[in-house]
Amino acid sequence: MKTVNLFVSLILIGISLKTFAKEPVALEMSEWRPFVYMEDGKPMGIAYDIVKTLFERANIAYHFEIKPWARVYQNGLKKKNYFIPGLGRTLKREKLFHWICPLTKGTNIYFYKLKSNPIQINSLEEAKKYLVAVERGSYYQNFLETHFPQNKRQTVTQTDQLLKMLMAKRINFILLDEKIILKLSEKLGFDPNMFEKSLFAFNAQDYLVASINTDHALVVKLKKACMALKKENLINFN
């Protein structure tokens, strides 16, 4: 009788593991051109290509969606088996996620303004006198909260809004990196030469991360896949 029960238990465990292996995990991100975005209903981008290769090597099924950044970040703090393909690694976030694989070499973030805006800033202290807008829930916001008074900070839900607000002269500066400025300008039909880099703010490296309560086996598989692909020179960071 004990042998039969053990045999049945093993079958049930096997079925359970097989079901788990086929269950797609959630992979979600806000639009982050040219790194992660949707085009003609298909996920695209420099970082997305790396993540796709990682999940294929680790043999983990996933379901990808584009969502507003604030929602993506909150889901990453709460949900199980939840992955974000592009989170900047900062001290404030270090213990909140599993850091699986870098997706960029490191991004320099700058204060940008309209070229026609006569304001000149040469230091962070000077920048603090002006109104700066960033995407809500981003490491740009973390930076502003650390260095700027509340009345000089403004947040938006989507990155597109930053360029539109600059164009409308509703703000003085935004925080972004050059690649995103160029891609957003192209998407919105703006001349990128209308925007000017004013001052270096900080550098951050973006990672594929997992929510802190993600199954350990998934995290290990993806980290091993990252190490193997880097060793084989099959993934390149931009």
Image: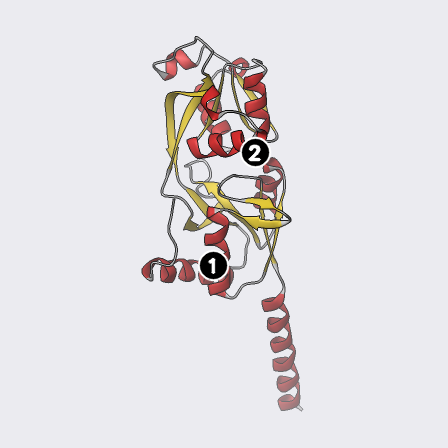
Q: Which mark is residue 236?
A: none
> What scheme was used to colour the molecule?
secondary structure
Query: How far from the left and from the top, in percent, is residue 51?
Result: 48, 53
Circle 1 residue: 53
Which one is in front, 43 or 26? 43
Can the viewer see residue 180? yes
Disc 1 secondary structure class? helix
Circle 2 residue: 187
Query: How far from the left and from the top, in percent, is residue 175?
Result: 47, 25
Disc 1 marks which amino acid?
Thr
Q: Is residue 197 left or right of residue 73?
A: left
Q: Quadrant of the C terminus?
A: top left
Disc 2 marks which amino acid?
Lys
Place residue 223 in its image quadrant.
bottom left
In the rendered image, the residue lying farthest to the top is 118
Residue occupying image coordinates x 65% and y 78%? 12
Residue occupying image coordinates x 67% and y 91%? 1
The relative height of residue 162 versus residue 44 in the rendered view (above or below) is above
Disc 2 secondary structure class? helix
